[in-house]
């Protein structure tokens, strides 16, 4: 299980700034040369570690997480990934050294298709049942998505 501090970091504006850099966009909060970062420059990675001490704590345990995330971003850019399931496969391979089988990638793609059936608008969260019925995921997962919609309906009333 992931460290709770790292989980809370995912929503932090500092982490979002770093992710913006990985997407090739700028971020005013962190003065990093994106091209040098993508080239693996240690000085640029060090700036990220100083900016995000939570990631530095992971590095002290022997895992260069910034380097791995930069490698992931480079792979995704160079492979022109259009399918999110393939992107998840690349991510698993880079982050954990594990190849994702074609069947696992298909299942990831099906879950992503199911999540696309969730509609979020001014009225809250709803699920397009026709869309959801067409997706090849377990019925239990479909029921959980429908329950999300019902809970939101009751909560917002």
Image (spheres, rainbow, N blue to C red):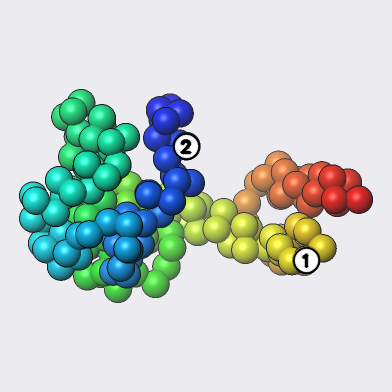
Label tally: 2
On the rendered structure, is 127 left or right of 97?
Answer: right
Locate the N terminus and report the quarter of the image it occupies: top left
Residue 157 x %, y %: 91, 50
Left or right of 145, for residue 70: left
Secondary structure under badge 2? helix
Q: Residue at x 47, y 37 (%)?
A: 8
Of callouts 1 and 2, the N-terminal one: 2
Q: Residue at image x 50%, y 52%? A: 107
Residue 71 disc label? none
Is residue 54 in sight in this rendering? yes
Q: Of residues 20 and 112, which is closer to you in this image?
A: 20
In the rendered image of this protein, does residue 119 appear above or below residue 94? Answer: below
Q: Which residue is mark 1?
A: 122
Q: Decide: few, some or many residues near mark 2? Use Cα within 10 Å; few <14, some 14-19, many ≥20.
A: few
Q: Residue furthest right?
A: 157
- Identify residue for label 2: 8
Q: Quadrant of residue 55?
A: top left
* Image location of residue 83, percent across then percent down: 42, 67
Say what secondary structure mark 1 lies in.
loop
Residue at 84%, 45% in the rendered image: 155
> Residue at the location (57% across, 54% down)?
111
Q: Are marks 1 and 2 in contact (CB under 8 Å)?
A: no
* Crowd around label 1: few <14 · some 14–19 · many ≥20 (10 Å): few
List x then y, in percent, for residue 130: 77, 66
| For residue 96, side relative to residue 44 (left or right) | right
**Front-most of residues 12 and 67:** 12
Q: Give the CA distance from mark 1 to mark 2.
A: 27 Å
Examine the image and state in which quarter residue 76 appears: bottom left
- Res 58 quadrant in image: top left
Query: Is residue 94 among what the camera can see?
Result: no
């Amino acid at each position: 299980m992931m460290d709770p501090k790292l989980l809370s970091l995912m929503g932090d504006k500092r982490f979002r700034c770093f992710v913006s850099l990985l997407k090739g966009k700028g971020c005013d909060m962190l003065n990093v040369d994106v091209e040098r970062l993508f080239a693996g420059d240690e000085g640029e990675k060090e700036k990220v570690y100083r900016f995000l001490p939570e990631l530095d704590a992971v590095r002290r345990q022997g895992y260069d997480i910034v380097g791995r995330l930069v490698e992931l971003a480079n792979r995704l850019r160079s492979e022109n990934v259009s399918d999110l399931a393939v992107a998840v496969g690349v991510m698993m391979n880079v982050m954990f050294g594990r190849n994702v089988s074609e069947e696992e990638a298909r299942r990831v793609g099906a879950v992503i298709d199911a999540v696309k059936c969730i509609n979020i608008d001014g009225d809250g969260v709803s699920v397009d049942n026709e869309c959801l019925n067409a997706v090849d995921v377990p019925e239990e997962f479909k029921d959980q998505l429908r329950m999300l919609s019902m809970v939101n309906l009751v909560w917002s009333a």
